[in-house]
Amino acid sequence: MKSSTPTMKDVAREAGVALGTVSKVFNGLPVGASYQAKVEAAAKKLGYQVNQYARGLRAGKTYTAALILPAVDHPYFGALSQHIYTALARRDYRMLLYLTDRNPDREQDCINMVRQNKVDGIIALTYNPLSIDGELPFVSIDRSLGPDIPCVATDNYGGGRIAAEKLLELGCRHLAFLRTGSMQPGETDKRGDGFEMVCRTRNIPCEVFRQNGDGDADAFRAFFRSHTKNGKPEIDGIFCSTDLLAERIRKILAESGIRIPEDVQIIGFDGIRQLGTNSLYCSTIIQPVEKLAETCVDLLLAPDRSNIPSLVCLPGSYAPGGTTQEEF
């Protein structure tokens, strides 16, 4: 009995082209635009689907990439995973998602599982030192894992500079940089470096308070008490290492009756949008998330990896979000 499942020969017959032309279209090889349109129309009409497994065997690939993230309940990580998925799908790649909750053992377990699943490469945002197979294409986000592993990041140093210059432009004269996060060094540490450099250059007082992990709210309260005189804050401009920290600091200051942005102006970092809206949580340095994702995928799938840069920095941009005084 003849199978009801259409074959490449059926597509070629329906499109009126050679079988080799159909093969080129389905394997992403260049053909004339009119031929490609005919083949795609015939495949759609017949309900033909490319056998990705067979295609992968012929090409020596799985057409699958792994993405390793701490979580997806954080708005930035959620947006990043969506854009990486979209960038891979445009190249006919599937994405396997692994979540680690920042746990070092789980991060390494994910790397080991990915090796077993025979993917074509890994994109990862991790917080701990890892043992990585040098033969498997790997792209790191925000953290250098070695000279042969490309790292993609926003220009964190430049973002810190922009934040300091904006606060000074808006009239602030006593600044602070607040940071929470991993104790492992990474590109995100440069946010504070750029901010402090502007303060030193301009001779502006700058207080720096760093905590590892999620940070302790009582420690932040104590920090602000130590910089309060006669019930008024000495600090009038704050740069937070993330938007989520900026939101926490806004609430902590509000507990003491400090008004944002009238008494203290705050700038965060990430560009997180409120769920279901296009509104920012705070004034912020926006990370170019879509461009970050595209760059990661381009580096991962590059046919020639001999000249791939060890670090690619993409520019961020400032946007007001209600915690600075442009709108007042």
Image (tube, rainbow, N blue to C red):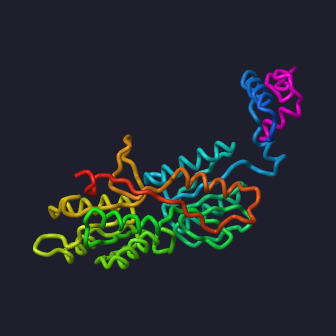
Question: In this view of the protein, which residue sits in the foreground, 107 or 7?
Answer: 7
At x 64%, y 71%, the residue is 131
Residue 11 included in the magenta stretch of the image: yes
In this rendering, would 185 be left or right of 111?
A: left
**Could you tell whether 325 is left or right of 4 in the image?**
left
The total number of labels drawn is 0
What x and y, as percent, mark residue 180? 38, 69
In the image, residue 7 above or below residue 213: above
The x and y percentages for residue 219 are 27, 73
Residue 113 percent across, percent down from the top left: 65, 59
Q: Magenta part of the protein: which range?
A: 1-28
Q: Indicate whether residue 27 is drawn in magenta.
A: yes
> Residue farthest to the left?
230
| Between 132 and 75, the one nearer to me in the picture | 75
Identify which residue is drawn at 77% across, 37% down. Answer: 51
Q: Is residue 287 left or right of residue 5?
A: left
Q: Quadrant of the N terminus?
A: top right
Residue 116 at x, y percent in the picture: 71, 58
Dividing the picture into quarters, in which one does residue 233 lie?
A: bottom left
Could you tell me which residue is drawn at 51 percent across and 53 percent down?
289
Quick check: 70 above or below 34? below
